[in-house]
Image (spheres, coloured by chain):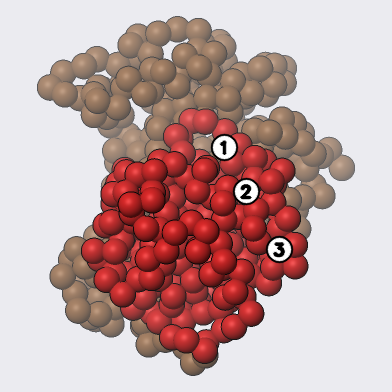
Chain colours: A brown, B red
Amino acid sequence: MPEKIEDIEIQLLLEALYQRYHYDFRNYAQASVKRRLKQAREQMGFSSFSAIQESLLHDPAMLGRLLGYLTVQVSEMFRDPSYFRAIREKVVPHLRTYPSVKVWIAGCSSGEELYSFVILFREEGLEQRTLFYATDINQDALAKAETGIYDLDRIQLFTENHRKSGGKSSLSDYYSAAYGKASFDKSLRKRVVFSDHSLVTDAVFAEMHLVSCRNVLIYFDPVLQDRALGLFKDSLARRGFLGLGAKESLRFSDHAGSFTDCVREEKIYQKLAE
Amino acid sequence: MTGVSAEAVVIGASAGAVEALSVILPSLPADYRLPVFVVVHVPPDVKSILAELFQAKCKIEVREAEDKEPIKGGTAYFAPADYHLLVETDKSLSLSNDEAVLYSRPSVDVLFESAADVYGPGLVAVVLTGANQDGARGLRAVADAGGRAIAQEPEGAYASAMPKAAIAKCPHARVLSLQEIAVYLQDVEKV
Ligand SMILES: C[S@@+](CC[C@H](N)C(=O)[O-])C[C@H]1O[C@@H](n2cnc3c(N)ncnc32)[C@H](O)[C@@H]1O
């Protein structure tokens, strides 16, 4: 079957995005990219993907809007509570043996996963010796993560998740509520470095003891997944931990041989010592 | 539309799904040629047991879809709870965490639209029982791409809203009973 015109247009649009702004979505899983670009086209009132491309090339303001569509910002605090329970029970005891700990939350979105980790580490008495790196390619999301303000109507779910994850305190200890918003305490950000970092185009930046990258790889094709996993492997210390999303795994990756299962059902791996 | 050989089947169901699928999936023969992708609306926090349940009843292989898994014929793939299921051009599967569509994740529309894009006239799409509107838009996309569109007869459905909405949006859809759908799917692989 000859390639559809739409598919050619999408390739060209992604190429333009890369050449003009260095955001590389060319190897993301295409079905999802296409779906989101169709939403962008409809909602922004463009007649074709080529029209979006033209506007993107000439109007830098389009970049942020398009990235808003292309990057999926769906998150929760303590999402998949059993994952955080496993971190608490199986990973934290190892981390305790280190005098200082570095944790990288890659693809942190608007911060929900980050705050979950900081609260968990505070409960476990590890926060003061830990540095958290929170990275994402979406600057609006990072800015939101830095303010730590969420709609109050999401707090019930977060509280429930926190409890199910084995939380030892009350989530309400960490935020103040006003005007329909929950504002998380700034002390939670004292040990956090936020930064703009792409798993597709950027390099390793520090030696980590734990990398948590959840629900990001799912948007990549197998080649990109492998690149990102290689990055995690290289940035982890010997016997460092890697946590992935519930539906992500090392199974099909070239790097599978460098890791061993820590908590298999939760997709938590440990780097081999070699 | 007729004459083009079928390449894949997609099925969407909500309330009453297990009973309806129990008529259809177990009737497919062990050497069934086509892959079958299934979205059933299930609550997000419950570990889905659908694949296990149907594996026990079916002659074809039944499994929960995994991200980036290559598609095999004669296999039914269920979307996992809390993830959308999509078909990629290279005939592999993707899962996604995108927002719920019409309050549903997995969404029938999301599966149908991506599969219509990949298989075009080679797709057979079935909307079964359900108490919402999911699947209508997707069925229309399948028909627009030249695929075969089928809706369960609303009168016989446990919940009629979903097939009704699908028929309204896609008036040329074949309207069949569960038994007829089972027979149709057995015959269509031979076209
Ligand atoms: C679905 S969210 C996951 C948020 C959080 N990790 C969770 O599991 O709740 C996916 C995030 O990945 C980010 N992302 C997409 N491509 C990326 C890349 N190349 N490098 C880093 N982050 C990326 C998106 O901006 C988005 O914030």
Residue A114 sits in quarter:
top left
Q: Tell me: is circle 3 under 8 Å from ligand 1.
A: no
Crowd band around label 3 with a 10 angstrom C-alpha radius: few (<14), some (14–19), many (20+): few
A186 vs B177, left or right, is left
In percent of the image, x 26 and y 57: which residue is there? B165
Percent x, y of residue A234: 69, 49
**Front one among A113 and B138:** B138
Q: Which residue is mark 2?
A: B64
Find the distance from the CA under tag 2 to the CA under tag 3: 19 Å
Chain bearing tag 1 is B
Amino acid identity at mark 1 = Ser
Closer to the N terminus: mark 2 or mark 1?
A: 1
Q: Judge whether A256 appears above or below A192 on screen.
A: below
Residue for badge 1: B48
Camera-nearest label, 2 or 3? 3
Query: Residue A11 falls in which quadrant of the image?
Result: bottom left
